[in-house]
Image (cartoon, grey):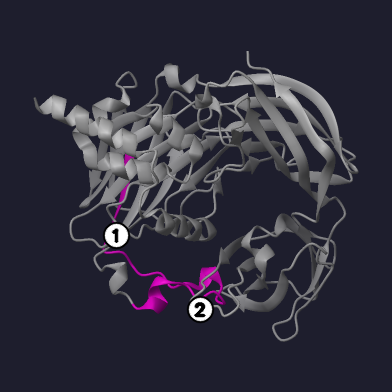
Amino acid sequence: MERYDRKREYEQWMQQLETPPASLEYTVQRAQHRAKRRPFRLAGRWLAGAVSFCAAFVILVNVSTPFAHACGRLPFLKELAKAVCLSPSLAAAVENEYVQPVELTAQANGLTLRVEYLIVDQKQVNLFYTLSGEGYGTIQGDPSVSGADGEVLPPYILGGGGWEEDPAALRRSTVDFTEADVPGVLRFTVQARAWRDDPAAQPATERALPADTPVCAEAERQPDAQATLTVTLQFDPKYTAQGRTAALGQTIRLEDVELTLESVEIYPTHLRLNLSQPETAAAWVQSLKFYVQDERGSRYEGVADGVTASGSTDSPLVATQRLESPWFSRAGQLTLCITGAEVQDANSRVKITLSETEPRVEGLPAAWDARLVRAERTGENGQWGLCFAGETASRQLFSSTYWDENGEEHSIRSWGMSADPETQADRAARQWVYLDGDLTGTVWLQPLVTRTVAAQQPVTIPLPMD
């Protein structure tokens, strides 16, 4: 009888997935705030600092158990619905029971990592988990991944981690493999740090970083507890094999920009369109304006919550563009529609005169509304912090490479964004870009996007469905 009641309750929860949670508006604001303060990180960035405690657990993921078997932990079904409500692809995966319920637990030093669910395909792993500890009001989790024996993985993008306003909230981390497939075994590690006080009890100045202050200047409190928590996942090939690729090989032109559509890849979690351009291109595609439509008129557009595009350090072209996935649509025909692109002119440069009193900027793209509002030295090393404000500053402004007045090449140390309507009269986004501290005089930065090009008529291409 108990099993029957739980199954019925589970079915009721599944029906509610079609209705956005009542707190959706708040969830969107929180997700946007996290996205601006915690951008996706490229593979190879190792976390600094040693921790004294470590725990590791190994388990074989039981992928044959359907999502319905998770009804024994009903409260987390609602949390899972909230966690995926910003991602149409992941929401579709949940609705179609393409979810692996797991109960992996790692404990150390009074802190617990519990992995509740997985959504996995050939290129991407989504982990849904909680971090808890009795008596702690704030727990920060910084995730990392490695191979079965701790080895470095092929190139990937890792998203998620950081702070949660609700310590009991279901968190999500995404591991997106840009070239290779998801490996058979993956070690997921969270560097957890906990504080006993509740963030809501802190003064507002400690909870929110002022918008006109460099992101890196935020003071960090020492945690009351910390631990390294690790679980090891062994995936069933039934899930890691999910995906299909179709060759296209069609060259199109958007005003003066020529590009070739090489192939399309469709996975349960996302769609990838792979591009190429001639090495002598005068303008490189950074973001393609496109969508996929099925025979019923349903559109699949840019990724709403996750990786939107990826490229290589060997080329300025962002060669792989992403959309939400039509995998679960069961469509008989899909059509690719391209309307334009945002491009980077190869020789574009922005000249900045470094000065804490009278900084100057020349050559900002005409399409930008961002302006340089501050330049100052920050941190112990005196690195330069450049603050840009305006609507355009809500997205990354510059490429990672810049040049000093002698023509020597440098790499931007870091960048971050903030937007706090409560502390900003104009409500404009602000973006801080950090440069080497030993620079003087002028520097040249390369804008990530300089202009937009459009197709005279939308380019439409039927996609092979085999």
Say which quadrant the C terminus sits in.
top right
In the picture as drawn, the residue positioned furthest to the left comes out as 1
Would residue 17 be found to the left or right of residue 387 on screen?
left
Q: Nearer the viewer, mark 2 or mark 1?
A: 2
Look at mark 1 in the image and give the residue it sits on.
Answer: 194
**Residue at mark 2:** 423
Q: Is residue 23 magenta?
A: no
Q: Nearer the viewer, residue 427 or 396?
A: 427
**Where are the magenta residues, as a range?**
203-230
Q: Is residue 148 visible?
A: no
Q: Residue at x 46, y 55 (%)?
A: 28
- Picture coordinates of residue 29 (x, y %)? 46, 60
Query: Closer to the camera, 280 or 232?
Result: 280
Mark 1 packing: few (<14 Cα in 10 Å), some, or many (20+)? many
Given the image, on which type of amino acid does mark 2 rest?
A: Thr
Q: Amino acid at mark 1?
A: Ala
Residue occupying the far bottom of the picture: 357
Q: Quadrant of residue 60?
A: top left
Q: Are marks 2 and 1 in contact (CB under 8 Å)?
A: no
Residue shown at 39%/58% (left/top)?
163
* Mark 2 vs mark 1, CA separation in Å: 28 Å
Q: Secondary structure at mark 1?
A: strand
Question: Does residue 33 appear left or right of residue 187 in this picture?
Answer: right
**Image-based side of 228 in relation to 2, left or right:** right
Q: Is residue 402 above or below residue 279?
A: below
Residue 196 in the image: state x and y as whole percent. Answer: 24, 65
The kind of secondary structure element at disc 2 is loop
Query: Which residue is pictured at 39% across the width and 71% down the height?
Result: 207
Q: How many marks?
A: 2
| Residue 199 appears in the rendering | yes
- Vertical placement of residue 174 versus 443, above or below: above
